[in-house]
Amino acid sequence: DGGITQSPKYLFRKEGQNVTLSCEQNLNHDAMYWYRQDPGQGLRLIYYSQIVNDFQKGDIAEGYSVSREKKESFPLTVTSAQKNPTAFYLCASSISRVQETQYFGPGTRLLVL
Amino acid sequence: SQQGEEDPQALSIQEGENATMNCSYKTSINNLQWYRQNSGRGLVHLILIRSNEREKHSGRLRVTLDTSKKSSSLLITASRAADTASYFCATDGGGADGLTFGKGTHLIIQP
């Protein structure tokens, strides 16, 4: 069964806590992306990675961090510096940067306690 | 920054009718894509149209692109209740960061 998985489906964060959202893909894609979606809004790019051990900031990277140690995995950490983390987080991948179609995971909804 | 802007923001039609959504953008593009999102789910790719194409079909979907007006339209014919979802256009300007998404059109198909 090929695709992108995200876990958990729901995540609760306490004040001052860092939390990590998981994104795994078995599509052998080089490029991976993290987006944030607020209610009634489009997607905003947080971070992207074109290849293992390389990643770049997107439009709203402040308060977030990522790593890309393996081709299959692109975890996103929401740090305590992110003051308004409540949102729906979507991970996506594409074969490469020049393969433009992106494939999305099911998303993680982050809520603040 | 968001480049694509969909219009209308929301659309409600009867089952069997056609639904048309529009997307406008600001800068030059390599291609424009349409995605669908069911409530609380990830996005699903529907169709990609390149900057040198004017029209493309996929099943009940028809997409047009007018690069002189920097606009695109998505037509869903013979709509079904299952078509109820949000539809997003996304532009690829050729940058390393990939796609730029609009805010979407929320489509409701009344049975």
Image (cartoon, rainbow, N blue to C red):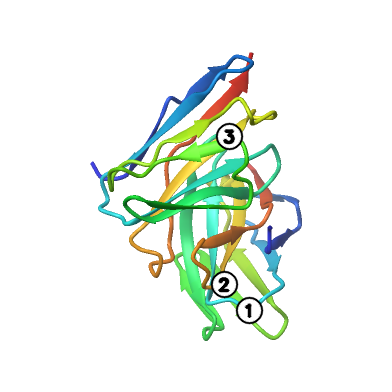
C-alpha span from label 2 to label 3: 25 Å
Q: Nearer the viewer, mark 2 or mark 3?
A: 2
Image side of residue A8 versus residue A45, left or right: left
For mark 3, name the chain.
Answer: A
| Kind of residue at badge 2 | Gly
Nearer to the camera, B21 or B17: B21
Q: Is residue B70 above or below residue A89?
A: below
| Kind of residue at badge 1 | Ser
Quarter holding the N terminus of chain A is top left
For mark 2, name the chain.
Answer: B
C-alpha span from label 2 to label 1: 6 Å
The reply to whether label 3 and label 1 mark residues of one chain is no
The numbered dot on residue B28 is 1
The reply to whether label 2 and label 1 mark residues of one chain is yes
* Secondary structure state at the residue bearing disc 3: strand
Residue A50 locus on image (x, y percent): 39, 58
* Residue at the image point whose x is 50% and y is 41% from the top: A90
* Secondary structure state at the residue bearing disc 2: loop
| Kind of residue at badge 3 | Phe
The numbered dot on residue A88 is 3
Residue B2 lies in quadrant: bottom right
Quarter holding the C terminus of chain A is top right
* Residue at the image point whose x is 51% and y is 61% from the top: B97
Image side of residue A82 versus residue A20, left or right: right
Nearer to the camera, B78 or B22: B22
If you read the primary sequence from the N terminus, does the residue marked by circle 2 or circle 1 appear first? 1
